[in-house]
Image (cartoon, rainbow, N blue to C red):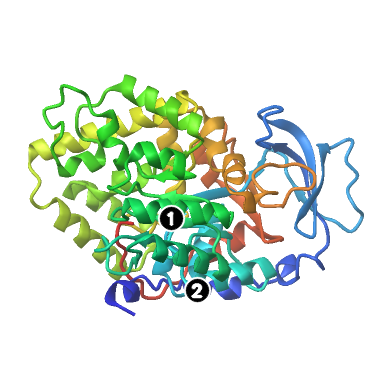
Amino acid sequence: MNVLQRVLVFGLLGLTACATSGGILNQEPSNAPPLAFVGVTVVGMTRSSESEADQTVVVQAGQITAVGPRAEVVVPGDAVRIDGAGKYLMPGLADMHVHLEYFDDPAILKLFLANGVTTVRNMDGRPHILDWKKQINEGTLVGPAIYTAGPLLDGDPPLRPDNMVVRNAAEARTAVTAQKSAGYDFVKVYTNLSAEAYEAVVATAWENDMPVSGHVPRAVGLKRALSGQASIEHLGDYAEAIEADDSPFRNHTQWFKRFLGMPIDRAKAQLLGKEQARQGAWTVPTLVQADNELALPDVVRQRLASPEVAYIPADMRAIWEEQTRRVTARMDDEDWRRVALGRQNRLLLVRALQESGTQLLTGSDTPNPFVVPGFALREELKNLIDAGLTPWAALAASTRDAARFADQLDGRGTIETGQRADLLLLDANPLEDVTNVGKLSGVMAVGRWFPRDERVRMLYSRRKPSAPQTR
């Protein structure tokens, strides 16, 4: 294990014990009594209506068995009743861009659950993550549902030393076939992949019913990637396509283009969004990661003092601070103006994509600096609101649309009879303010109900962490 991995081993001591405490938490879902949320307002994300007041939702063996008006739904006599008066029930959230490979201890998974994230999409697979996924599915490990790529595929030289190198079509076919056999769900491509290898990856993945997602390889280009990939991760790869014709940086490489800190053409962005929608590729903007990567010293100090960062052990906080300081130490006033412009342009691009019909997903890119597992998704939802999405559309990107995107997540994302009971009970209406997803009265996942006190215990205790890289 290298130093980066050692620092990101993020244990959160005691979390395993809290999942087996009293009540129904120490019973397997198949043996637990039914659970009934009575008199709750349901934000079901079905689009039949935005919310339905005074409803009852019955759950048995981890599945929703009844949804309807309180006066009409019969609650089983042996059910555990949860008073939902004044509360809101919605589907669990999905963080569709995380990097679990930096963690050795599965206790980190409970930090997602404690924040209402009941599904994660892991972007760089490892055998131990497949083990976690299997244990979660079997009910022997408490954590969010895991949907995972295999080890990401890069060219020669790889952009990062731990990337899997595929030099040609033959190696690409071998790599994809091996990942399918190992049990990974999809393939992630990366920046230095050759055009030959990329075409073989896409073709072999298609033959093996594995979606392809990731960055846009430089040798491939965005136009081809829109037809070859299920999703584009981050927004930096859109820079050349949306840069204004009169931009003084056109046809020049500049560091701030990765943050979209150059003049852009909104009409180009809208046309691109329409083409992307036609091709069917989705976008995971990871706005929260880009926002947190570059920050002035005063902002870094504010982040270090924030409540959510207090859950991060001191040595990891120090690493995040050092990484941010090292990146920004040489930046001048003009650079910071580019950073501010980049933030505006990222929001404009997200709005243009959404208005043009491109489907969006929420992803945090945790554990990059100050992107705290679980907490960061709340920030990403707020970012989508800042980009001009409605609360319903922002929440859909993290619930029903995540399930639509990933076939293996079928049965999640909405509150309907027959769906999996991945649920959040909230103290305030998320359709009025999406950050209300943080006002959790309880979480239901993996067939277990975690009331408020269990969630609080999930947020305490920690071990030594290890340090992330931007992926």
Report helix, strand or loop for mark 1. Answer: helix
Report helix, strand or loop for mark 2. Answer: helix
Q: Residue furthest top?
A: 267
Label 2, residues with CA under 10 Å away: few <14, some 14-19, many ≥20:
some
Location of residue 276 in the rendering, given as x and y in whole percent from the top left corner: 44, 32
**Amino acid type of the residue tagged 2 in the rendering:** Pro
Residue at image location 67% in from the left, 49% down from the top: 410
Q: Is 135 situated above or below 280?
A: below
Residues at circles 1 and 2 in contact by the CB criterion of under 8 Å: no
Residue that carries the numbered disc 2 in the rendered image: 127
Residue at image location 53% in from the left, 39% down from the top: 397
| Discs 1/2, front | 1
Residue at image location 42% in from the left, 67% down from the top: 101
Answer with mark 1 or mark 2, whichever residue precedes in sequence: 2
Which quarter of the figure has residue 42?
top right
In the displayed structure, does residue 356 sit left or right of residue 464? right
**Amino acid type of the residue tagged 1 in the rendering:** Ala
Label 1, residues with CA under 10 Å away: few <14, some 14-19, many ≥20:
many
| Quadrant, the N terminus | bottom left
Location of residue 238 in the rendering, given as x and y in whole percent from the top left corner: 31, 36
Nearer to the camera, 469 or 373: 469
Q: Is 149 situated above or below 403?
A: below
Which quarter of the figure has residue 369?
bottom left
Q: Is 3 situated above or below 318?
A: below
Residue that carries the numbered disc 1 in the rendered image: 200
Nearer to the camera, 303 or 358: 358
In the displayed structure, does residue 223 sit left or right of residue 338? right
Nearer to the camera, 278 or 464: 278
Residue at image location 8% in from the left, 38% down from the top: 333
| Quadrant, the C terminus | bottom left
Location of residue 229 in the rendering, given as x and y in whole percent from the top left corner: 46, 45
Q: How many marks?
A: 2
